[in-house]
Amino acid sequence: MYDSFNRKINYLRVSVTDRCNLRCTYCMPACGIEMLPHDQILSFEEIVEIVSFAVHHGVNKVRLTGGEPLVRKSIIELVTRIAGIRGITDFGMTTNGILLNRFAASLKEAGLHRVNISLDTINPEKYRQITRQGSINDVFKGIEAAQKAGLDPIKINCVVKQNSLEPDAVAVKEFCDKNQLKVRFIKEMNLETGLFSIVEGGDGGHCSSCNRIRLTSNGDLKPCLFSDLSYNVRELGIEKAYLSAIQNKPVCGSTNMHNQFNNIGG
């Protein structure tokens, strides 16, 4: 389907949970945030129905996000069910990698194609400071497991303050080059102030060619990351919510005062 600015919408990002096993400084406060009640979180049946509708209307790229998608109970079952939807040619997941060592082989077997893994530094102490509680060794093990499982390509998402010339970013680039990983540098964003920029090494941030819509874990279809617009599938029904999200997709993002990165998936 095409939006009102003639952009072909073929990419659906699905936040399967607002929970996360890290507390990254740029994503949420140290004390955490109030989580959604479980009855507000979409069921697997609802997610599969929404994805199926989207694929029937032109989506061929699906990415699972969170929070951290691997903390969602029975996530392999959901991956299996989505992978069985005919028409998806690119099926990925964005993860912090902490649990990937445990799940990589099962994810591949279930039908996932590839993963993006968040890694902002390769310094163990700095990593723990950024994530407030994570161990970088778990991420390294997750990367190795993903490579062994054949989740390819593996892309590393590195958040930077200004650009890829920062010391941590340079070190991450060297690590990726050494380990045959692709790297994307994402300037730290702010939903409330509308701060975002072009992703270096990726296609994010190009409003004029944006091809995506987002499904939050509580059923809001959002046409733009930096917009308060949302259309809830439970309130409106899948068809009306989906078509409204595409028809009302703005030409460019501005601000988002209603969401946080843990529940919209970035």
Image (spheres, rainbow, N blue to C red):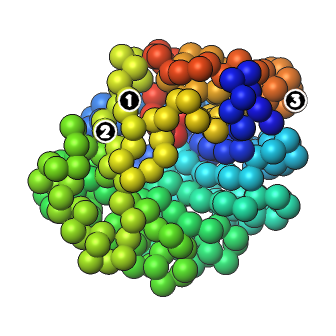
Q: Position of residue 174 (x, y in %)?
A: 21, 68
The amino acid sitting under disc 2 is Lys
Tell me the residue that label 3 is attached to: 239
Q: Is residue 208 left or right of residue 89?
A: left
Question: What SS does tag 2 mark?
Answer: strand
Image position of 54 with respect to 235: above or below: below
Tell me the residue that label 1 is attached to: 196
Residue occupying the point 18% across, 58% down:
170
Q: Quadrant of residue 40?
A: top right
Q: Position of residue 85 (x, y in %)?
A: 83, 59
Tell me the residue that label 2 is attached to: 187
Give the mark, 1 or 3, whose residue is nearer the N terminus. Answer: 1
Dot 1 alpha-carbon crowd within 10 angstroms: few under 14, some 14 to 19, many 20 or more: some
Disc 2 to disc 3, C-alpha distance: 34 Å
Residue occupying the point 82% across, 58% down:
87
Q: Quadrant of the N terminus?
A: top right
Q: Is residue 114 visible?
A: yes
Q: Position of residue 55 (x, y in %)?
A: 81, 48
Dot 3 alpha-carbon crowd within 10 angstroms: few under 14, some 14 to 19, many 20 or more: few
The amino acid sitting under disc 3 is Glu
Circle nearer the viewer, 2 or 3: 2
The amino acid sitting under disc 1 is Phe
Q: Is residue 234 left or right of residue 20?
A: right
Q: Position of residue 42 (x, y in %)?
A: 71, 39
Give the mark, 2 or 3, whose residue is nearer the N terminus. Answer: 2
